[in-house]
Amino acid sequence: MIRGAFGPPPRGRDALELERPMQRATKNLVVDVQAVRPDSAGALTYIRGMLEGLSRVEHDYRVILVGHRASLNVLSRDVHAGVLELPLNTQSTFNRLLYVWRLRRRIEEEFEGGNTVYWMPFSMGIVSPFKRIKTIVTVHDLLVFQHPKRLPWRRRIPRKYGMRKAIAYADAIVCVSEFTKQQLYLLFGHVIADKKIDVIYEGYKVAPTECERTHAILDQREPFLLIVGVNKNMEFLLRCFHRLRREHGYAGKLYIVGNIGSHKEIPLAIRRYDLHQSVRCLGFVDDAELPSLYRACDAFVFPSDYEGFGLPILEASYYGARICTSDAASLAEVGPLCKAQCANPFNEKEFTQAIDRTLRMEKPSPTVHDGFSWTKASQALVRICDSLLAGD
């Protein structure tokens, strides 16, 4: 039996009673949170943003998080929702497949009526479709199909399999940008021809507090460029940064947010261009630490050549940073709305010049674009749920 929870997740298979029960709830929205880890910045931001949005909008759904204990521990501290724990770790491929089988069985046991929607915020894979439960899948990008070598080989095969199954069995698909939707049609047009596909933009991530560690970093009072994420065309950026210092006289540093442990090309490029004293690798940075970095940086640089959406661009604009990004993939769609300088992420000279132009711009005021809101995104998700249950 599932019961609601507010606060730490249960230690057994069942949950605690809701502190604030949802009296109007007549339908169920089951949210699969298996993709969440404490350091999974993108997945955590997206799922937390959507759940917070659902808590603010009017709807008649009881929101239930389903996953293993590690994921529920991360989310349930600040998200008002029910909890269904599956006692299984999904780090290995075998356990992930076993998890999906158990997930399907448990959900069908708990929800026998036709008033339930299962939502997979990240397309990790559905082994077989549910019998009487509608399914929504969110597709963020198709990197594993278009640039498979950028992922470790052990993650490539299960992710490809999982995405194919999720897309094939979903009753509705959500894409986070028009770019992702176009790529989905390009690769799976024959599979999704009769499916409902909606584009729902992501929202702004607002940190409620700021962290002491950030203040310690900024106490050095040195100018710096900032990038968030290490799998973002980093070797190219380091070449541009080297050129910016040599040809344009930039005297500041480059702060890299993210763990570079498995990205051997980054320290190699730092040594190659003699940037030991000019690059600071900050490692994992909590959400509460980012606002001060965005506000203090000379410019936020994001030369990624492939993004499904580009949430860091949105965050940087919210906190009033100058932005220089690429004109590739979804960034050509999101960048101009955030008043960013966009340049070719394959042309070193052009991108370096774009950074220099960005540095000469007047620092913008914080920007909030009406199209990017977790509340609006959650309302759109609720409309899709209603449409599926109504049989539209």
Image (cartoon, rainbow, N blue to C red):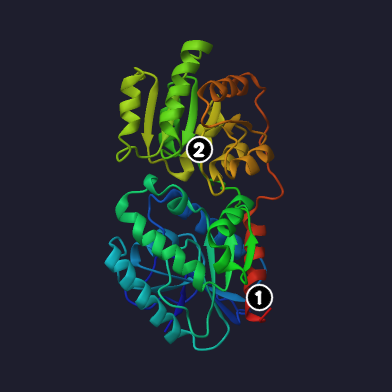
Residue 174 image-quadrant placement: bottom right
Quadrant occupied by the N terminus: bottom left
Q: Which mark is residue 134?
A: none
Residue 111 position (above or below residue 146):
below
Counting from the top left corner in percent of width and height, residue 324 is at 58, 30
Residue furthest out toward the front: 190
Q: Which mark is residue 386?
A: 1
Q: Secondary structure at mark 1?
A: helix
Residue kind at label 2, given as amino acid type? Ser
Residue kind at label 1, given as amino acid type? Asp
Reading the image, the residue beneath label 2 is 304
Residue 76 image-quadrant placement: bottom left
Q: Residue at x 63, y 65 (%)?
A: 197
Q: Secondary structure at mark 2?
A: loop
How would you rate the neighbour count of disc 2 (Cα within 10 Å): few for under 14, some for 14-19, many for 20 or more?
many
Q: Nearer the viewer, mark 1 or mark 2?
A: 2
Quadrant occupied by the C terminus: bottom right
Q: Earlier in the sequence, mark 1 or mark 2?
A: 2
